[in-house]
Amino acid sequence: MLLLSDLQDGLLTLTINRPEALNALNSEVIQTLSDAIDAAAANADVRAIVLTGAGEKAFVAGADIKEFADFNGEQGKELAARGQRLLFDKVEQCRKPVVAAVSGFALGGGLELAMAAHVRVASDTARMGLPEVSLGVIPGYGGTQRLPQLIGKGKAMELILTARMMKADEALACGLVNQVVPLAELPAAAEAMARSIMKNAPTALATALDAVLAGYSREGFAAEIESFGAQFETEDFKEGTQAFIAKRKPQFPGR
């Protein structure tokens, strides 16, 4: 099963279950998780959601590059628009609190998924980043918008433009995650965080989520989709993705 679901006393834990692929996001995973969020939103027995990945190596290591390496610009644009609509926006706009429990790699689409959650609890093994520019593309699932919102423009620019990974302690210091705990304590810490939220009034929680999100423009997400798609028409994208698949360093012009 691509997604494991466990409901205990109002807390729904959704586990992306592709450990052999480091829980990488492909179209099937995105659709399956989207359906699960819809079902949770409609289920009165669900009070909060913990979102995590199977195994200790990765929360989600990123998108499945092989799935879109041959896309053109229009297909790239649709990839980003569909992903944002089906999953990332849906997680962020869910009126039930979503806590991401992050261990191991949370890169690219994986970090974008964690950022779409309302609160992030990480293990001390977590490694986070947006490496897209090293592949000749840009973050396309909301990363250019949510990262600055969470950690500020300057730090977000550094991480997006360098494509480097951030360790858990740095992520905590800049506000990317809310809490860092030893790996063995992550499930309990994420549950404790969710249950501390669940004790409050459900209608007030839903309204508070709506009110916070109202302060952020959606225009930037639309601009990201357009720019993401345009990058698929470049030689940099073709070189970057083919180099990734071939497990070699890309040779971008001017390097």
Image (tube, grey):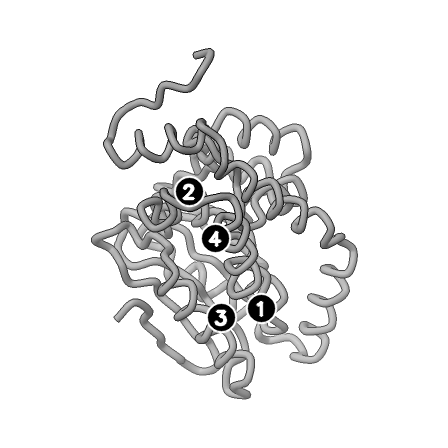
Residue at the extreme bottom: 44
Query: Which of marks 4 and 2 precedes in the sequence?
Result: 2
Question: Farthest residue in the top direction?
Answer: 254
Instruction: Give, as a three-letter code, the residue at label 2.
Output: Leu
The span from disc 2 to disc 3 (Cα, nearest Å) is 21 Å
Distance from disc 1 to disc 2, alpha carbons, whole Å, reads 22 Å
Question: Are discs 2 and 3 less than 8 Å apart at CB?
Answer: no
Identify residue type, mark 3.
Answer: Ile
* Dot placed on the residue nearer the N-terminal end, 2 or 3: 3
What separation in Å lies between label 1 and label 3 (alpha carbons)?
6 Å
At 48% from the left and 53% from the top, the residue drawn is 121
Q: Nearer the viewer, residue 97 or 109?
A: 109
Q: Secondary structure at mark 4?
A: strand
What is the crowding at mark 1: few (fewer than 14 residues within 10 Å), some, or many (at least 20)?
many
Label number found at residue 223: none
Please tell me which of labels 4 and 3 falls first in the chain. 3
- Seen in the picture, residue 37 relative to 153 is either above or below; the reply is below
- Mark 2 to mark 4 CA distance (whole Å): 15 Å
Circle number at residue 97:
1
Give the vertical position of 23 relative to 61 (above or below).
Answer: below
In this image, 60 relative to 199: left or right?
Answer: left
The residue at the point 52 percent across, 66 percent down is 86
How many numbered marks are there? 4
Query: Which label was assigned to residue 49?
Result: 3
Q: Which residue is mark 2?
A: 107
Residue at (51% x, 44% y) in the render:
73
From the viewer's perspective, is 174 left or right of 31? right
The residue that mark 4 highlights is: 121
Q: Are marks 1 and 4 in contact (CB under 8 Å)?
A: no
